[in-house]
Amino acid sequence: MAAPSAAEELVEFFAAGWRIGARDPERFYAHFGSRLTPDALMTQPLAAPVRGPGGLRELFAPLFAAMPDFTADVVRWGATDDGVLIEIRLHGTLGGRPVSWEAVDRLVVCDGLIAERHSYFDPLPVALRLMRAPRLLWNTMRRRI
């Protein structure tokens, strides 16, 4: 059997982190933080851009607080010249109701570390659910201001 490519290894690392998800936020932050550059740029709809391991916590803490079962599954992926594109299905329970959506995360790698993570998804279904969860909506809006 051939050794996994760097892209395959990165996708497995990504999937392993999301298997942890919100069930153990500290392990999630430690897992992904170990592979982020100190100033890694992370962007996604409905959130202000953040940088580095501290930004990772800032980005996900409100989501994990609102959805203690929040996680993601890798659907498919493809290597790029500078990293990978990973299609994922995110899911959890928000305001007592299940919510799920699909996203594509683009990871840019530099010297084996994630230098950028950009998530692309239609924010409308999530925004509609946020409107029914005032605490999470407030935390999200406060970060954007």
Image (cartoon, rainbow, N blue to C red):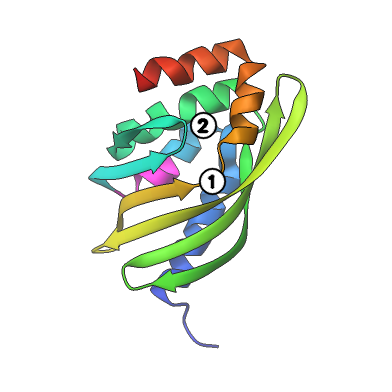
Q: Which mark is residue 25?
A: 2
* Residue type marked 2: Pro
Region of the chain picked out in magenta, as a range: 30-36
Q: Is label 1 in a helix, a strand or a loop?
A: loop
Residue 116 located within the stretch drawn in magenta = no
Quadrant showing the C terminus: top left
Q: Which residue is mark 1?
A: 121
Quadrant showing the N terminus: bottom right
* Number of numbered markers: 2
Q: Position of residue 38 (x, y in %)?
A: 22, 43
Q: Position of residue 137 (x, y in %)?
A: 54, 17
Q: Residues within 10 Å of mark 2 (few under 14, many from 20)?
A: some
Question: Observer-nearest residue: 64 or 122?
Answer: 122
Q: Position of residue 135 (x, y in %)?
A: 56, 11
Tell me the residue at 31%/31% (across/down).
54
Question: Observer-nearest residue: 62 or 128?
Answer: 128
Question: Observer-nearest residue: 91 or 35?
Answer: 91
